[in-house]
Every structure is written in structure tokens, then in C-alpha cells.
Image (cartoon, helix red, strand yellow):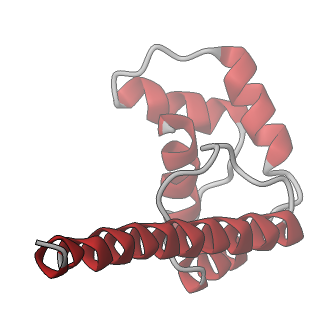
Amino acid sequence: MEYVYAALILNESGEEINEDNLTDVLEAAGVDVEQSRVKALVAALEDVDIDEAVEEAAAVPATTGGSGGAPESADEGDEEAEEAEEEAEAEADDEDDDEDEGDAGEGLGELFG
């Protein structure tokens, strides 16, 4: 995650996101830099408008759980967000159902003595 944060810092400060700059930021933060990860991130961000991506991410409500992996495209991210939201709603419905079932049986013992 610190690699992504370093890229965000570079973007926010107006610096070019390249291998040297990314490595410098990471080393300044005390991170043991893996050059393969630096190269992969720089390549992945080559055609990405970071400001636009951050703006879109801010518009999507945060959810808990999930795979933890970053989506490869904006459409995939939207689909994953929808799926996560549906799963959260389904879990909430299941919990509500369980509570309702437990409450329904409590008064029956008193009826039958």
C-alpha cells in the first residue's frame, strides 16, 4: 500500500510518477523498496488519470470486506462495489431474519404452560 501512497504523494505535489521519484519517496519513508513492484506500479499508472480515479473512488461508498485487490478498470470497480453492497444487504437481512425467528418462539412457552 505504501507504493500507492507514494504515487499519490508524487501526484499531489505535481511531480512525475516515475521509477526514480517513486523509489526516492519510498526510501525517504524508510520502506525497503522492491524495484519489481516500483516498475509494475509505474507501468500500471502510465495511462491513469489519478485525480479522476481518486474523484471516482470518493464517490463510491466505502464497504467492508472484499478481496482487497484493486479493480483493473472503473467498470470492474463499479461491479465489485455493487456486489459488495448487495452482499452487505443480504447479510443484514439474514441477521434481521435470525433475530425475528428467535423472538417469535419466546412467547409460545407461556401459552402452553
* Residue drawn 34% across the image and 22% down it: 30
* Residue drawn 17% across the image and 81% down it: 111
Image coordinates for residue 40, horizontal then vertical, percent: 79, 31
Note whether 78 is above or below 84 in the view shown.
below
User: Which quadrant would residue 95 be assigned to in this image?
Assistant: bottom left
Image coordinates for residue 90, horizontal then vertical, percent: 58, 71
In this view, which residue lies farthest toward the bottom? 59
Looking at the image, residue 74 sits to the left or right of residue 83; the answer is: right
Image coordinates for residue 1, horizontal then vertical, percent: 51, 38
Quarter holding the C terminus is bottom left
Whether residue 50 is visible to the viewer of this picture, yes or no, is: no
Looking at the image, residue 77 sits to the left or right of residue 57; the answer is: right
Note whether 77 is above or below 7 in the view shown.
below
- Give the mark count: 0
Looking at the image, residue 91 sits to the left or right of residue 100; the answer is: right
* Residue drawn 23% across the image and 76% down it: 108
Image coordinates for residue 41, horizontal then vertical, percent: 73, 38
User: Closer to the camera, 113 or 102?
Assistant: 113
* Residue drawn 50% across the image and 68% down it: 94
User: Closer to the camera, 9 or 85?
Assistant: 85
